[in-house]
Amino acid sequence: MTDTIIWTIVILAGLGLLLALLLYFIAQKFKVVEDPRIDEVEKALPGANCGGCGYAGCRDFAATSVNDEGLTRHFCPVGGNEVMKKVSAILGYTIEEKAPQVAVLRCNGSCEVRPVVNEYDGVKSCKVKASLYSGDTMCPYGCLGCGDCVAACRFGALAMDPATGLPVVDETKCTACGACVKACPKNLIELRNKGPRGMRMVVECRNNDKGPAARKACGNACIGCGICVKTCTHDAIVLENNLAYIDFTKCKLCRECEAVCPTGAIHGINFPKPLDKDAVKARIAERNKAAAAAKAAAAATAVKPEAKEEAK
Amino acid sequence: MNRKTFSIGGIHPADSKFAADRPIEVLPLPDKVYVSMSQCLGAPSKPIVAVGDKVLAGQVLAEPGGFIGAFVHSPVSGTVKAIGPGKDLAGNRITQIEIDVEGDEWAPGIDLSPELVTELPDDRQVILDKIKAAGVVGLGGATFPTHVKLNPAPPAKAEALLINGSECEPFLTSDYRLMLERPSEIVVGAALMQKALGGPVCYICIEDNKPKAIESMQKAIDSLPYKDILVQPLKKKYPQGGEKQLIDAVMHRQVKSGALPISEGAVVQNATTSFAVYEAVQKNKPLVSNIMTITGNCLPVESQHNCLFRIGVPLSFIAEWAGGVPEKAAKIISGGPMMGKAIANLDAATVKGSSSLLYLSEEVTRRRPEQQCIRCGRCSDACPMGLEPFLLNKLYLAGGREEELEKNAAQDCIECGCCLYSCPAGIPLLDNVRQAKVQVMGIIRARAAAAKAAAEAAKNKN
């Protein structure tokens, strides 16, 4: 009886050992050599697999970055500079720091200012709606309000505001992965630099129609009047196709454009104090006056010598 | 009577041809017309007139914007007021020419007499040139330039010309009225196209719910001296008027995925297009008018109309002429109830392809609440292209499955709406499949572009 038990144990143990050895040698023979840095890089990444970097996921990002010659083609928008520093330390590359970005909606056509003129009864999808017609308001450029961007966001950073009918970006959650930018059929979402302490200026409109048509469609529309372009002292605003656009790399956050905009299409975001429009307007008026005076003086000095000659 | 129909799928929506007994009336001219530059499938046309120019009816306003494009003519005589942006019936931006109407003086050389000209030109090139110069496009809905279709690139050869008079969409009666009132012109137009194609057999295809049209066309054929033109009665089934369905019904041939009808030796032209071809070739009259049905389920029969309108007349003017928009109308559609487009902007102008103004009430247009798919398979049974709409819908909603969508032939969808009509769960199949089709067409196009680039790169290397 005892013999049987002992033999069984010995045979099974021996068989196990033999098979283990066999597996070990096979594993050695057919080993796939993988760069160990891929794992390290992947561990350093946030692991959101959002595809915001342009690769199929974090693992793909790691694998391609290890085989690449530098990190110019790789940037993880979710992890930002911190993660990229870690990655570059692992791979031994130097990187340029990028300014953190955030998704910004370029439409402010809330239900109040942009009346609904027909009822949409189809699928609740902006893509489908945009393929059928220009939308249920007079503005063919504005937000369709079906929330494709909200569905595309993997970080819960977007939500529809029922009061305005527009999506709202939660800046603490937004990672600037760009999924919403691709999801919006009207191209209303843009990734912009967060700016110092999150402050930035945005033209919240994409209406390319001429002034009267744009105004008729939406009370908050940019009418392309160009006052902001004339006022801006930093050359940060361009007017194209009846629409102003603020270049965030040039903007110095003086908020003068916001003060002069007649329709309220330009908005300052995350400023600590509300804008005192009259004070800013007074400042601009004074500056214009001074400029006009300087110009007049210059003109006067230019004219004077001739006048003197004539007097002689 | 040997009635034929297509072999797979199809549905039987209620006929609802309420305006069938209303004769074609001529619409008066408005004060202003707006001629759109996007009147046909393909590139938008390029204006060749300037603001302030005096134009005559039938004068060329714009040239084709590409190989697939058509001339656009002035529908009225007057002064060009503006050339600029406008909105089409979906509210999307287009370029349009605004003309102040000053009368109805026609350009010289256009024959406006009602006499029938039965003698055909000898040269097929003359016919094609005249059709091209007159800006004739397919009036069945797709507005594909007719001269391109009638001039297939060799070695393709037309074996049959199908004149589509099936008008399978419910409510619409414009083709029917034309077949009753101007059958001889349609037959001469068919003979012209037959000649342009090199003499294939011509079938005038009419569904059996229009016996009077069948009789009228038969009479016209008997009274005219042309050979090989026959009336082909069809069993009523939607979407019989679809090009591929019609070829299947009459010739028992299946057009392959991605191929054109000419690959099976068929050319399909609408009955109204045939009429336009007659006017273009025999009367030198360009395509500046079309027939529109004003109908609906909430419109009394006495205010339903079939009218001959000039292209560019605003839809609101037609609605006003016909007695205003009925109060019960919840949805206004341009085209039939199955494939037509909802009108978001009634101020938009009519285009060459406008065929109806359809008022539908709340009860029939409101979407049913969406429920779960119960896998009944009705959508697959109804699909005339043999697709599986429920599967395409699921793949589309899953996202990023373009290759599987292509394998399941989402690109073959003809957007007839049979799946949506037959779904008992109210699932918006068509809306999603249409998006899937766009995605698949995108990857097919990208692949073709990549192949072209690769071929060019290889060429440069050598």
Image (cartoon, coloured by chain):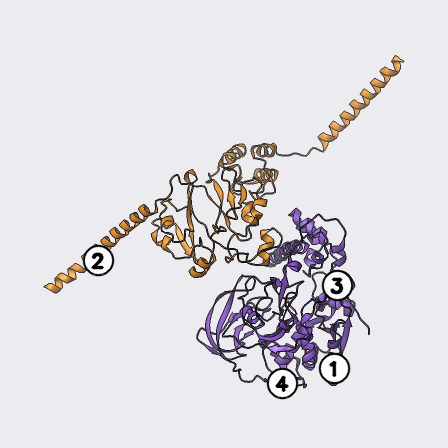
Which residue corresponds to mark 1? B221
Residue B426 lies left or right of residue A190; in this view the side is right
Q: Position of residue B137 (x, y in %)?
A: 62, 72
Which residue corresponds to mark 3? B12
Which residue corresponds to mark 2? A299
Q: Position of residue A101 (x, y in %)?
A: 48, 42
Count of marks overlaid on the render: 4
Q: Are dots 3 and 2 on a single chain?
A: no
A114 or B92: nearer the eye? Answer: A114
Compared with residue A209, is residue B401 higher up or lower down, i.e. above or below? above
Q: Amino acid at mark 2?
A: Ala
Residue B428 lies left or right of residue A14; in this view the side is left
Q: Of circles 2 and 4, which is in front? A: 4
Element on which disc 2 rests: helix
Q: Of circles 3 and 4, which is in front? A: 3
Determine the colour of chain A.
orange
Q: Are dots 1 and 3 on a single chain?
A: yes
Q: Position of residue B167 (x, y in %)?
A: 70, 70
Q: Amino acid at mark 1?
A: Ile
Distance of mark 1 from mark 4, alpha carbons? Answer: 19 Å
Q: Amino acid at mark 3?
A: His
Q: Amino acid at mark 4?
A: Pro
Assess disc 1: are there few (<14), some (14-19) or many (≥20) residues with their C-alpha within 10 Å of its C-alpha.
many
Q: Of circles 1 and 3, which is in front? A: 3
